Amino acid sequence: MASRSFTESASNATKSARETTKNALENPSATASNVLRQPYMRAALPFINGGIAGMTATIVIQPVDMIKVRLQLAGEGQKTGPKPTALGVTRNIIASGKALDLYTGLSAGLLRQAVYTTARLGFFDTFIGMAKTRAEDQSRNVSFGERAFAGLTAGGLAAMIGNPADLALIRMQSDGLKAPEARANYRSVIDALTRIAKSEGIGALWSGATPTVVRAMALNLGQLGFFAESKSQLKAHTNLSTQTQTFAASAIAGFFASFLSLPFDFIKTRLQKQQKNPQTGELPYKGVLDCARKVAQEEGWLRFYRGFGTYYIRIAPHAMVTLIVADYLNLITK
């Protein structure tokens, strides 16, 4: 009896699988639509779309990010001296190797986006969805404060998760500044993470986590908070097309993201690049405040905004590509 029941269940399952496969082959769009409507997919889509959007933007912007990091590390500890430019840094990188050196650390950049942007856009969309539900129940619109809080929280959580990949990216991009015999010559992000953890300890992978989290919160307040608010205001007060609204809102968000986050990004880069002095065993900076104090005293307050143009060119297009791709993906998977 039990054997017959088991045989019938197996037969029904096989038949059901055949029918599902047949329907999928005959009508793939309907099948894809059914899969996208599943509860687990609805919850996962903001994270998936965010990751794809962030990785797409990183492939486009990686050379600018490489130049930005080199500018921030140039003239460390010196108040006077030559002032590097984005063009000069680019010329030096290409002259010392090849154009592909501008893509140094791409694997780390992609891993960072796969972790960080997946999390921050996923968390942001989830938090905004909760805020919208709460606002609808109270017969009101979502406030800028709620959007700002969603951006701050999503950015902070994602930055803590993605710090190891961010650290590996900085180490790989700054490696070329060292003397040839002192270079680590990391082969990939996995190689960098493994060697850093082995030589400096697992905790070293979260070096600079505090400014990374603060920087991410400032950046996401500017990027996600202002993007959502700008798009809402443009929709309410203009007759622009949806695509134009998205483009304009992402440009506005890119500026605020750059302005609010650059000082924290500068400190983060310095802290993540630093390594112990072989003679003294001490680090150049003891922490965020010590780094900020030393830079202000030794290099001047304006050093925190060195390379703002390059940073904006790195942040604004990255924000625009990320937000536009994510918006498009959200639209077609709605």
Image: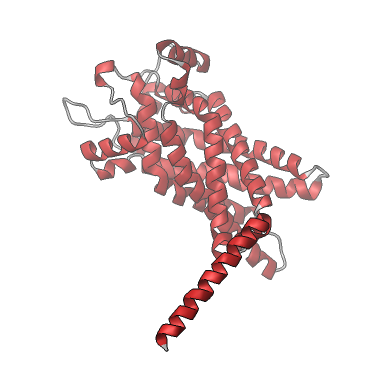
**Is residue 296 something one can see in this rendering?**
yes
For residue 81, what is the image quadrant? Answer: top left
Instruction: Specify the farthest residue to the left.
Output: 279
The residue sitting at 48% across, 17% down in the picture is 99
* Residue 69 shown left or right of residue 46 in the figure: left
Give left or right: position of 92 versus 140: left
Residue 80: image x %, image y %?
40, 14
The residue drawn where x is 53% and y is 75% is 12
Image: 286 above or below 131: above
Q: Is 275 left, or right, of 70 in this rendering?
A: left
Q: Is residue 86 above or below residue 288?
A: above
Residue occupying the point 25% across, 32% down: 283
| Residue projecting furthest to the bottom | 1
Check the picture and name the quadrant holding the C terminus: bottom right
Which of the 4 image quadrants contains residue 3? bottom left
The vertical placement of 41 against 10, above or below, is above
Residue at the limit of the structure toward the right, as seen here:
239
Residue 273 drawn at (x, y percent): 34, 30
- Coloring applied to the structure: secondary structure
Please say whether residue 83 is visible from this viewpoint. Answer: no
Residue 19, horizontal then vertical, whole percent: 60, 66
Q: Quadrant of residue 292?
A: top left
